[in-house]
Image (spheres, grey):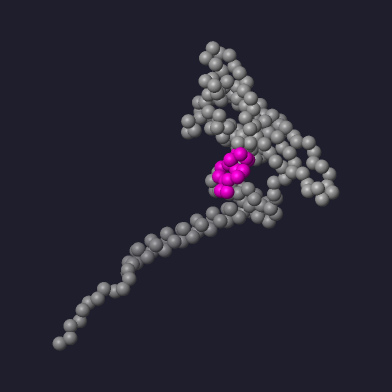
Amino acid sequence: MTETTDRPASGRVWSKPAQLVLGLAGALLAGGTGLFLAAVFLHVAPANSLSRQYRDQIDGVIYPEFEQNWKLFAPNPLQQNVSVDARVRTVADGGATHTRDWIGLTAQDLAAIRGNPAPSHVDQNLLRRAWDFYDGSHDQDEKQTSPRGRLAEQYLKRIALQRIGREVDGERVLEIEFRVTSATVPPPSWSGEAAPPAPKVRELPWWAVGDEDYRGIG
């Protein structure tokens, strides 16, 4: 007499509803990934009718977490060395104010990068990108030219205040000012090109500093 043993089928057997749910989830994931990649492509590609028509939607996907600072079809290396300095005005308990010396914020980053075999992305790009953000949203009279101009000011201010702190020599920080020096990278000696122009210095107005500026940074 031969005994037959019921053996379970190999592998998992999904029910029809489960297969339907998995299929829909996969389709949504693939569709979302495709839309995201399309938004990134349109953001870095040269301006066209499609990117202009859906600019607000594209910016909503890209900013602030996925911003790209390179050109897909025409890479443009940096042609200027930009140095950002900051100084603060402090107030003592008696009400007297003092304007402090300039602090080289870019110089601090360069000191952290030089000699470091694995420099931090923050040291390399945070301050530089903050200045690019500000410069792209303001004119030479420091007037906002973009709806994100106020955000750019707050971003730059908070980066500096994170390094300076709330007090200097026991006096509370009252205001902050930025100075930016832009120097064109000189051409190699063998190129025969003319020497670059003298560095340009740009001083921003004094900005008031309040408790809100330190929110989340101590």
The answer to whether residue 56 shows anywhere in this view is no
Please provide percent x and percent y for residue 38: 58, 56
Would residue 113 appear left or right of 77 to someone viewing this image? left
The residue most toward the left is: 1
The residue most toward the front is: 115
Instruction: Tell me: residue 134, above or below residue 32.
Output: above
Residue 169, quarter of the rendered image: top right
In reply to whether residue 181 is colored magenta, the answer given is no
The residue most toward the bottom is: 1
Instruction: Tell me: residue 211, above or below residue 15.
Output: above
Q: Could you tell me which residue is drawn at 51 percent across and 57 percent down?
A: 33
Please provide percent x and percent y for residue 85: 64, 32
Q: Could you tell me which residue is drawn at 52 percent across and 26 percent down?
A: 166
Instruction: Tell me: residue 11, above or below residue 67.
Output: below
Please provide percent x and percent y for residue 210: 53, 25
Q: How many marks?
A: 0
Give the magenta range: 109-128
Q: Could you tell me which residue is drawn at 74 percent across and 43 percent down?
A: 185
Please provide percent x and percent y for residue 135: 67, 37
The quadrant of the rendering that contains the N terminus is: bottom left
The residue lying toward the viewer, choosing from 204 and 89, is: 89
The residue lying toward the viewer, choosing from 53 and 10, is: 10
The residue lying toward the viewer, choosing from 105 and 214, is: 105
Of helix, strand and loop, which mostly describes the magenta segment?
helix
Q: Could you tell me which residue is drawn at 66 percent across and 26 percent down?
A: 205
In reply to whether residue 112 is colored magenta, the answer given is yes
Would residue 195 appear left or right of 39 to someone viewing this image? right
